[in-house]
Image: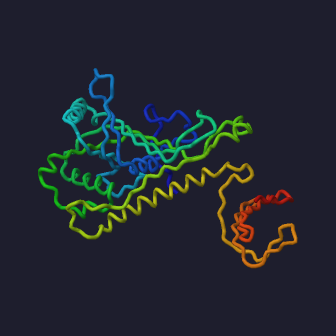
Amino acid sequence: MKNQLRYPAGQHNKVHRLAEKRASYDLETVHSIMNRSFVFHVSFQPDAEDPFPTTIPMLGAMGNFAYPSAGLNEPQDCYIHGYISARMANLSRKAMDDGLPGLPVCVSVAKVDGLVLALSAFTHSCNYRSAVLFGHAALVTDESEKLWALELLTNKIIPGRWDQVRQPPNKFELMQTQILRVRVTSGSAKVRAGPPADDKEDVQDPGVMKNVWSGYVPLVERMGQPIPSAYNQLQDVPEHVRDLQEGFNEEADAYNVKLVKQETRGINTQYSEPYRLYNTHISEYELGSPMTLYGDVPFMQANRKDSYVGLFWLNAAETLIDITKAKTKTDTNTNT
């Protein structure tokens, strides 16, 4: 098994707060978060005498022109596109004239996946994914690399779109469109994915527990149904557009399900792990009374190493009954 390539933690990219829990330097994690985001925030110093940095939102994608088949777990450049001002282009050229690989830039992205509501305002948080890259930006002047980068950026946003649009680009389009290539020197990611981290004193305080709701509010970025333009003449939505919507939403929903499962941990101190539920039926069950149930009763049962939990619906009484039994105990708790 290959070792995971990592950015070395250094002066600029090292994560300091909660690094042991949330920081990641492996290339695949950093590059995947970058490519999952549509907008890249590109920051640079406009002038040595200007104390304030400039930040410009741009479209971006990770790629390797020399090795196009390189995966996200391998070295990548960052290609960015948007309004590239004359000042930004001139700064890039000046930096190269001064012997640098390009204009020093910081490129960052962040995605909020949910709101974490705790017992105290000071322990509230968000589940998020963030990444930052440091490198040197230079204008792409080679025509073949520029066309490759434009295709990369287009297909990163809408896979397969480049081959579905009018080709080739005309000279005016290529002249008006600029691409910056950032040679990445370092990067890092920071990810939070978990339940509230309340203080022990609050959790053990009955007054707090009975009066404050804690939990998780998912925030899922999803794509809506494609809407044709006023002048569109195609009756059907192209397959690559449908695939984009379905694939994007499936990935977003899958990650949200993963987070929600993690949020369920710790809600009950006896059952601190999510259960895999199984559908089964029972034909007779004794409730500690003369009454006996005959026929199939829908029953949900979940198992783990040291215990199990079950849930079924008693239609006759319209009462929801759940049964919890720990294998380490001899009693069975029944709640209605």
Q: Nearer the viewer, residue 332 or 60?
A: 332
Identify the residue at horizontal 61%, vertical 40% (top origin).
118
Residue 299 versus residue 184 in the image, above or below: below
Residue 238 image point, x, y percent: 29, 67
Indicate the quadrant where residue 210 lies.
Answer: top right
Identify the residue at horizontal 62%, vertical 35% (top origin).
120
Q: Is residue 96 visible?
A: no
Residue 190 versus residue 154 in the image, above or below: above
Residue 302 image point, x, y percent: 70, 64
Q: Farthest bottom residue?
A: 295
Q: Is residue 314 visible?
A: yes
Residue 283 image point, x, y percent: 76, 77
Residue 113 image point, x, y percent: 49, 48
Identify the residue at horizontal 57%, vertical 38% (top origin).
124
Q: Nearer the viewer, residue 289 or 64?
A: 289
Query: Left or right of 140: which side holds 309?
Result: right
